[in-house]
Amino acid sequence: MNPTIGWIRQLAESWRVPTALVPLVPFLLLLIALYAVIGLAAYGALRKWPRADKTIAFWLFISPWLIGFLMFTVGPMISSVYVSLTSWDLITPPRFVGFANYSEAFQDPRVAQALKVTLLYAVLSVPLQTALAFLVALLMNVDLPGIRLFRTIWYLPSLVSGVAQMVLFLWVFNPQYGLANDVLARAGIQGPGWFSDASWALPTVILMSLWTVGGAMVIYLAGLKDVPLTLYEAAALDGAGLVRLFWHITLPQLSPIILFNVLTGIIGALQIFTQGFIANGGPKDSLLFFVYYLYENAFQNFRMGYASALAWMLFVIILALTAVTARASAFAVYYETDLGGRRRRRTRKG
Amino acid sequence: MKFPNLLRRSLPAGAGFAALLLAAGCATGSQPAANSNSGSADISFSFWGTNSEAASLKAMAAAFEQANPGTKVTTNWIQSDYEQKIQTSIAAGTQSTVLEISNTSLAGFAPSFAEQQVDPSKYLQPNISSAMQFEGKYYAMPFAAKPKVMAINVDAFKAAGIPLPSATTPLTLAEFRDIAAKLSRGEGKARVFGSSNLWYRGWLTAAGGGFYNADATACTFGDSTGVETAQYVIGMQKDRYAPTSVDIEGQDQAQWFAAGRLGTFSDFGPWTVADFAKISKPNWTLVPVPGKGFPMEVDGLAIAKNATGKQLETAKKFVEFVSTQQVAQDLLIQGGTALGVPIIAASTPTLEKVLPADRNLAAFTTALKTGVVGVSVPREAQISGDAEKGMTSYTALGSGKDDVAKVLPELNAKCTDALKQ
């Protein structure tokens, strides 16, 4: 251990800091020291500039996030570009191999399988989640006694963490003793193997993902509450029925929110990991999600270079799909705000 | 932003101190951070395990400190993802001075461990020390063995009129199958199985086969012994003498045994003793695993390659102490459970006395003396993981339906290719 860190730890121990918190003391002290050095350097450099006070204040206030972002996000990202060009098992020194990892990935049948599973999951789960969340939001928007309780009930599952959720559903979909097959058996239907069956594993995970639509539902609900009632009243006076009200007012008004949920849903779906991890990739790699395969290479097979190459491939795929979705959405999303210029030209006239 | 004069004057001093602290705190020097203090006799020790296993290892470290005044062993109990964490610590140069390692993982980590001198005559059988060898050199010193034995439901045997198996001589696989058939009865969720779920890799060793050949140049689970063993396992499952992997999904087979749903429980390691010690009904005892027994895991202590000076001396003393001294070996047993079976003769009775003699914990000593230790291969997790995943996905060893006679040789060929890469 670094002698200075050791000395700080000893000092913390002599101050009777609880044992579990001792490792945090040197970390926090060094973080404060780093913050002080950068903050004071910024102060020294900028104090004579015009409007320096505001500029310094801006950089000082933003610096906790900025330092963290540079150290823990940008730094590792740059480092992973280099690692992706090496063969590295963490034990022996990294060996430069150029683009060999990328070229291997293009020929790896398990990469193809991982892409297939992940894209299939995204294509099926995102629309289903979006539709269900929207539908539930419409129902929860009805002003009835006790509706807040129902909203809470719908929202609660989204607070359950991924691992706990997966463990719970492993029980629900246990082929022998699970709730799902028990209910089906009572109806005279022999239930499938769910996670144990290669053809059912992915549909089961998609079904499972619908349990947590509460998070998106709350956002839709907030959007619905924001739609001006005058629009509905004017349309009703013109003789519009419920379907027309929904189609010509609710849907266009909520289209930016739908876009937001679809975009975050696509990004989240392409980064799905926990379900594949807990199910160990599923039978016949039926739950071999891309991020799980990346993890398997990095932390089970200790192929850091290959895993980094996969990470960059996923980054490019997500970037491309997000860009395409955002661009395509311009023809279906209605923005009421007066942004003028380019955006208005790309959006549908309201 | 206005700073008062006093504060303005103290800013350079503060900045200087902060920069100094930062430089000192981040400096690693020429030695890796973990072992830079080579002038001191203080060492660190990383290990995995459950609460009781960690208690054993901490007690060993404390016993060493007591026997060697002036030394300090800082324990680092890694409760999950042990290998991932030590691998990343090795990459960062912050690994502990001494690291626990199993024989199956040794080959992958050998380049980061110091070579050690091991005297095979100190242990109960030669397999124990040779388990810590890779390419003819010792990279760790053994300290615990984990042989498997089989628990049998004595009441079920008596009720079925079956004589109890020998306490020292293993059954043949055919005899075991006959016994399992006689013990099995009932239907549906109340079905009593003659055997617990059959672990293919274990039964492959019991049948005289192996996952790899002796020099780890080829995989061998796809040979005739491997296929016949797979057919044996699948046959037992098909006849409902043993539950399938789907049957036991999310289930605790020790609880099944306690509830009388299993006639035998074949995956019984030293750590299982505590769970079974609570079972008074049905009456049970231990016998050897049929055939040649299951593969035996041997755990050892490795010394980080970058340890030098006094730290290296202390580390060598520590691993020698834990590996060969009775006072340390006796500590493998904590309360009602055991991290592993002691590997020196003087400590053998310690485990055997944990439970009454009729439970026959001596079966562990017998299993240790005859235990088969598999070879250690680099990239073991990847190679065997891929093969086992294929078996469980495509054949009835897991949830698949394909013919083992076709699938195993194909997987075997892929496995051998992977070994050669």
Image (cartoon, coloured by chain):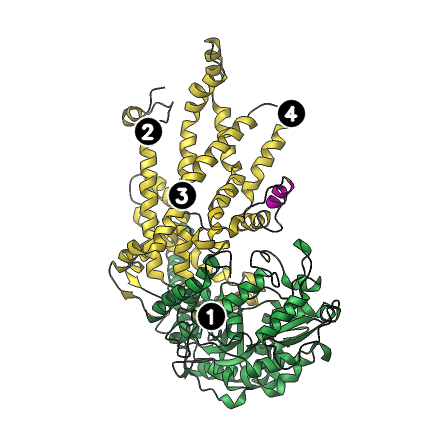
Chain colours: A yellow, B green
Q: Is residue A78 above or below residue B412?
A: above
Q: Give the camera-side residue of A231 and B360.
A: B360
Side (left or right) of B123 relative to A87: right
Q: Which residues are magenta?
A: A179-186
Same chain for mark 2 and mark 3? The answer is yes
Q: What is the number of the mark on residue A145?
A: 4
Residue denoted by label 3: A120
Looking at the rendered structure, whether the residues under marks 3 and 4 are on a common chain is answered as yes
Residues A167 and B323: in front is A167
Q: Position of residue A312 (x, y in %)?
A: 32, 51
Amino acid at dot 3: Leu
Residue at mark 2: A330
Crowdedness near tag 3: few (<14), some (14–19) or many (≥20) residues, C-alpha within 10 Å = some
Does the residue at mark 1 contact the one at mark 4 (Cβ under 8 Å)? no
Give the label on residue B226, or none. Answer: 1
Q: Residues within 10 Å of mark 2 (few under 14, many from 20)?
A: some
**Residue A181 colored in magenta in the image:** yes
| Residue placed furthest toward the left | A98
| B71 to the left or right of B156 | left
Rendered-image quadrant of the N terminus of chain A = bottom left
Q: Secondary structure at mark 3?
A: helix
**Which residue type carries mark 2?**
Ala
Dots 2, 3 in contact, CB < 8 A: no
| Between discs 3 and 4, the one toward the N terminus | 3
Q: Which of the two marks, 3 or 1, is nearer to us in this view? A: 1
Are labels 1 and 4 assigned to the same chain?
no
Q: Earlier in the sequence, mark 2 or mark 4?
A: 4
